[in-house]
Image: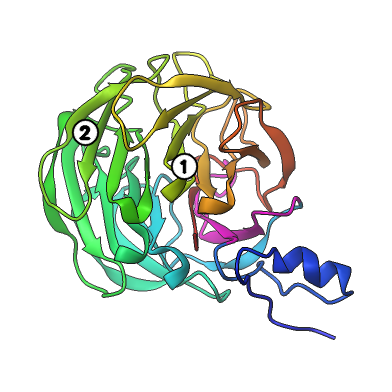
Amino acid sequence: MTVTITSFGGVDMANLAKIMGLDVPEGGVSGGDRGVFGGGDDASTPKINNIDSIVISTTGNALNFGDLSVARSSAGATSNGYTGRGVFWCGDTGEKVNIIDYITSTSAGNAADFGDYIKKVRYLSATSNGTNDRGVSFAGDSSKTNVIDYITISSASNASDFGDVSAESAYSGACSNATNDRGVCAIANTGSAVNNIEYITISTPSNATDFGDLTVARYILSGLSNNTNNRGVFGGGTTGSNSNIIDYITISTTGDATDFGDLTLGRRGLGATSNGTNNRGVFVGGTTTSRQNIIDYITISTTGDATDFGDLSTAVLTPAGTSNA
């Protein structure tokens, strides 16, 4: 017997289905617990259009979800939470592009065209205020830019200017406390590794404001959060050598980051996402001296080292990650 699984009232329906002897559909479940990872560079193609999917609350290997509209690496990604739309911003097809794609994260399938970014750019980061429906992207490599753009996630259209971060930068990581409306970006690289963290109020276009500092200056890192529980986490990157550092912040209050623990393997160019208030974060892919298919997980509210979750379908650098949480 095959059924479509959703979550309800915080109950992990994927695990319940397994206990009942039912089949979980390919690509995972809906209702806040589906993580998706799009594109990347697998060294042999090198750009891929594959979208992988996992059930964040259960360990295991990723399954195929569908394809991006264009094969590319180094995109940004975010969603409007359990409302169910995920977006992939820009990236690198061999050249920088301004493409924005969208998916319905509750239903496996291919991405469709959403609109265009203001510039052709790669190595940007993105986040949102969840079901309040605004997505924002930070900086990126258009020979570096300080631009913050925004979209209304439920309405396909071109991006609009939001404001600026303090310096032209790329390779950043971002997260938010969702409907509490604060977005945070670890600026990461302005020509060399930096430790800047800046924040915005997502519903109000303006320039970013200083938040504090990472524990160690680094770049090509990734961010995730447990949304309304207010903890943001930044993992991996490079200081000149690959880093296994995981830092955390309290998103609602400014201040410097604190050590959280370590990844299972130091690497740069990871994808990351979480299942929000359900409190699990995942870091995927990246590279050491070679591309990796590793998926690590953490319990966001509890400091400690990451644990092995499973594998992506492909060893890949700079996949873009988001979820329906």
Name the residue at 31% across, 17% down: 194
Residue tagged by mark 2?
144
Q: In which quarter of the image is residue 255?
A: top left
Marks 1 and 2 sit apart, C-alpha to C-alpha, by 23 Å
Is 276 covered by the magenta stretch?
no
In depth, the one of 285 and 155 nearer the eye is 155
Name the residue at 49% across, 51% down: 321
Q: Give the range drawn in magenta.
A: 33-59
Q: Which mark is residue 303?
A: none
In depth, the one of 150 and 176 nearer the eye is 176
Residue furthest to the bottom in view is: 1
Which color scheme is applied?
rainbow
Image: 231 above or below 310: above
Counting from the top left corner in percent of width and height, residue 141 is at 26, 37
Image: 325 above or below 301: below
Name the residue at 39% across, 32% down: 250
Q: In which quarter of the image is residue 215?
A: top left
Name the residue at 51% across, 60% down: 49
Q: Which element is circle 2 on? A: loop
| Three-letter code for the amino acid on which mark 2 is drawn | Lys
Neighbourhood count class around disc 1 (C-alpha, 10 Å): few under 14, some 14–19, many 20 upward: many
Counting from the top left corner in percent of width and height, residue 132 is at 30, 64
235 left or right of 79?
right
124 left or right of 55?
left
Residue tagged by mark 1?
224
Is 39 covered by the magenta stretch?
yes
Closer to the chain start, of discs 1 and 2, is 2
